[in-house]
Amino acid sequence: MNREKTEQEIREDLRKQFAALYGDAEGVRFFFAPGRVNLIGEHTDYNGGHVFPCALTIGTYAAARKREDDKIRFFSMNGKGNTFTEYRTDDLEPAGKSGWTMYPLGVVWAFAGRGMKLPSGFEMVIYGNIPGGSGLSSSASLEVLTGFVLKSLYGFSVDGVTLAQIGQYSENHYNGMNCGIMDQFASAMGKKDHAIFLDTADLSYTYAPVVLDGMKIVITNSKVKHQLTDSGYNDRRRSCEEALAELQKVVDIRALGDLTPERFEEVKSAIADEDRRRKAKHAVYENARTVRAVEALKEGDIPAFGRLMNESHVSLRDDYDVSCPEVDILAEEAWKIPGVLGARITGGGFGGCTVAIVRNEAVAEYQQTLSRVYRERTGIEAEFYVVDIGDGPREIV
Ligand code: ADP
Ligand code: MG
């Protein structure tokens, strides 16, 4: 995947591929939806807690056009399995379907489920410049992109929050991945140079300017993705649901996110199992950390924000058990480098990326030191992306 390509080059590649596949590129339109990185508030989105993600300037692009007949055609320019797949507008049920096209088709299915049935088919070529399997939410970006394409081609009236909800619904019910709303919300509602402080309990949100004077957000890809990703995620969800049910016998809450750390300490003995207690502890404390982190950012106290990021990592590593040795190396070695304000695992876990805040003058050393240490200890070449915070989905004209 070549992340160096400009948007216009990507657009041209898509146009050529589209014309080669579908005969011509007459009337084709181009779209983009971003990936995201979560600055803090991990595994809180399905616990009625707060998250603090931002959209990135990398994401997924599409060339798309309506068809006269009922065919739906997908092609991806990424990866080996980029075969052309065709469906029909009256055959959207998930049974018997597989592969990456389940993501965009699931969105078509979810639109239909909300009364937005397609009057005709469409054809689409996509290209993503999010590194695969890195935890930067290529799946949410693809879902939000598809929703935005449908809205734009057929004139459906759906706002950004609804696009996010449709994406999450289709990932949950069509792709069997029990994700929370954060990824799709960050992609659909992204705002340049702002992070989104989202309360997942009621979807209320505010934008917080991310003013990093003389600092950069650096994402480091461990390039490992452990098999546990999906099952581990769903297991964590179940632990939290069980812990919540146990707590609800002694305290009146709707979600773990309703508890302060102090209150949690008073009532945690209601959770019978030690492991489940640690999982619930993470959800409660991480939510509180996220609220504090956003306050710190608003006050311009980036060192405090960074310390909370580090604490978040420790909690995800020790209490929530979603880190892995490779990602721990990346975070823990980063903490030792002068000029690194904070570093933590980001995304669902079991591999993927860390996110760090690094002073401009320390970025080169950060990359050199981490690549060397990581190579020595794992044999793997880490990848680094100095990222910018971008807007939500848009048409490229
Ligand atoms: P993440 O969302 O963290 O990147 P996921 O495992 O949730 O990781 O989603 C990745 C999946 O999304 C891929 O395996 C593939 O099925 C689909 N996908 C995302 N982007 C593309 C793309 N550009 N082309 C084809 N499939 C894609
Ligand atoms: Mg995903």
Image (cartoon, helix red, strand yellow):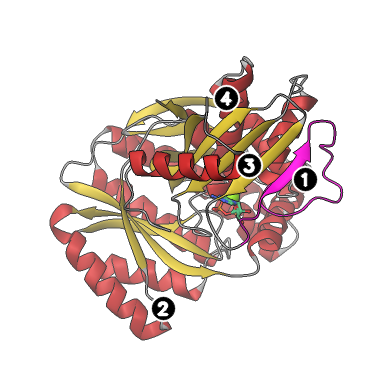
Task: State the extent of the magenta-drawn residues as a range.
Answer: 81-101
Location of residue 10 in the rendering, given as x and y in whole percent from the top left corner:
40, 44
Question: Which numbered mark, 3 or 1, is in the foreground of this view?
Answer: 3
Which element type, helix, strand or loop, lies under badge 3? loop
Q: Which residue is mark 4?
A: 161
Question: Which numbered mark, 1 or 4, is in the foreground of this view?
Answer: 4
Image quadrant where one finds the C terminus: top left
User: Which mark is on residue 245?
Assistant: 1
Which element type, helix, strand or loop, lies under badge 4? helix
Q: Is mark 2 within 8 Å of ligand 1?
A: no
Which element type, helix, strand or loop, lies under badge 2? loop
Question: Which numbered mark, 2 or 4, is in the foreground of this view?
Answer: 2
Which SS does the magenta portion mostly show? loop
| Residue 35 in sight | no
Three-letter code, disc 3: Gly
Residue at 29 percent across and 32 percent down: it is: 298
Residue at 45 percent across and 31 percent down: it is: 392
Residue at 73 percent across and 63 percent down: it is: 273
Establish if 102 lies above or below 375: above
Location of residue 258 in the rendering, given as x and y in whole percent from the top left corner:
61, 36
User: Which mark is on residue 180?
Assistant: 3
Question: Which numbered mark, 3 or 2, is in the foreground of this view?
Answer: 2
User: Which mark is on residue 380?
Assistant: 2
Location of residue 334 in the rendering, given as x and y in whole percent from the top left corner:
30, 66
Would residue 343 be found to the left or right of residue 322 on screen? left
Category of crowding for the residue at label 3, using alpha-carbon neighbours closer than 10 angstroms: few (below 14), some (14–19), many (at least 20) = many
The quarter of the picture where residue 24 lies is top right
Q: Earlier in the sequence, mark 3 or mark 2?
A: 3
* Marks 3 and 2, how far apart at CA: 31 Å
Three-letter code, disc 4: Val
Residue 224: in magenta span: no
* Marks 2 and 4, how far apart at CA: 39 Å
